[in-house]
Amino acid sequence: MTPDTGAQQTDLEARALYCERDDRILFADLSLTIRSGELLQLAGPNGAGKTTLLRLLAGLNRDYEGELLWQRKAVADCYAEYARQRLYMGHLAAIKKSLTPLENLRWLTAQDDASEDSLWQALEAVSLAGYEYTPCMQLSAGQQRRVALARLRISQAPLWILDEPFTALDKDGVRWLEQQLQQHVATGGAVAITSHHALEGIPGLRRLTLGGES
Amino acid sequence: MSLVMATVRRDLLLAARNPGEWANPLMFFLMVAALFPLAVDPDPVFLSKIAGGVIWVAALLATLLSLDALFRADVEDGSLEQWLASGESLYALSLGKALVHWCISGLPLTLMSPLLGVMLHLPADAFTALFLSLAVGTPVLSLLGAVGAALTASLRSGGLLLTLLILPLYIPVLIFAASAVYHAGIGMTYNGQVAMLGAMLALALALTPFAAAAALKLNLSR
């Protein structure tokens, strides 16, 4: 299922962001925009503040100075609307180990009104066909990551915010995810992603490096 | 399906898959009633006088046992972050979680209580009062407990802190509930006490989810 591009265009703008943690300035006077058809990759060494910035862009972290605008409105004022237009996946996958992939996916996509068929198809797309009724504790870390990523096939959100989605994936999984990103961007979606992975070849790719010199 | 309903459904499913989590407090509840007469005095006259109080103290401690895990797993595996990301109200989530907690702790305790009443020679007149006070009182324990569990969810050893935080808030419930059972046992009316418990439940239903929601946000805003 491809994102419904007619519904809403991505227009996320950050102005003069300033954020510090434990008396250390992570970024100052940082301005950026994410629009339809763009893929923003946040790079930088460990501890540079990639996840902090991503959570901030997702509206989860309110501890910063500056402005964050969605469709030219402050995110803090229209958070419920914004939350429905963007999909956030943290590096914690929110997978319950004693539930099956199908049950986990059903919870993860509860807001999308997904049909039972589309859940099965999404699991098939991430090569988990045949594991629908296996408790996730018997799956490998990579397979559990695939369960979480199966959401990308179901969500209609135009903006994806993904924190290290390539973690634990094998070669095929990496290729599959790159394909999803490419397709999403090509059909008018937008992506903000933290990854150490080279995402060459995806049109619309921009790279933002945090904490270069220290 | 809304995320609240999906979460209630998922948590009930999780409880069904891991029966140890909720069966342990129930065993504790049963063991207190079984061991008390052995250790103190098996005399029916003595037991019938203290039965109501013992059952209520055991129910309260059994509830405390099961509270610690209420939000911890969700904080650790990222479910709570997903909830916050969904933009749905944390008030509804807290209420839903407390409801599920009551279904797997307070409800079975209430249903088991007549058995414990028989084991401890509870006066025949007091059975209704015991059942009623538990049915109205244990949801209050779950709702108040959800606030404490939310506050301590991201602490590594929050169990002790949770007990210290929540136990004082449980004491009014215990006093009115035990008093209802005692008064029923000596043939007096107990409407007043049950009405007080009902008032506590109404207040807890309306207000505690706000406190729990605010506490959950604290865990996640870093």
Image (spheres, grey):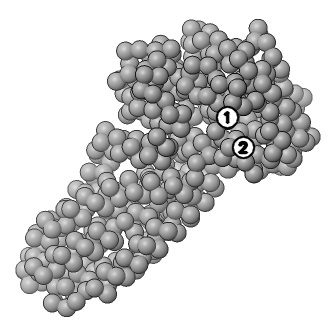
Q: Which chain's residue wears label 2?
A: A
Please tell me how crowded label 1 is: few (under 14), some (14-19), or many (20+) other residues with Cα within 10 Å.
many
**Label 2: how many Cα within 10 Å (few below 14, some 14–19, many 20+):** some
- Name of the residue lying farthest toward the front: A6
- Residue at 46% in and 40% down: B1
Chain letter of mark 1 equals A
Viewer-closest of A25 and A1: A1
Label 1, on which residue?
A86
From the image, state whether disc 1 or disc 2 is nearer to you: 1
Residue A1's x, y, as percent?
57, 19
Residue at 44 percent of width and 54 percent of height: B96
Position in image of residue A50 (x %, y %) = 76, 33
Across and down, in percent, residue A176 comes to 59, 12
- Residue type at mark 2 is Gly
Figure disc tally: 2
Q: Which residue is mark 2?
A: A59
Q: Residue at x 47, y 36 (%)?
A: A107
**Residue A192 versus residue B57: which sits nearer the camera?**
A192
- Specify the label residue B170 is tagged with: none
Q: Is residue A52 left or right of residue B202?
A: right
Position in image of residue A53 (x %, y %): 77, 37
Q: Is residue B96 above or below residue B145?
A: above
Kindly indicate whether the residue at mark 2 contacts the one at mark 1 (C-beta within 8 angstroms). yes
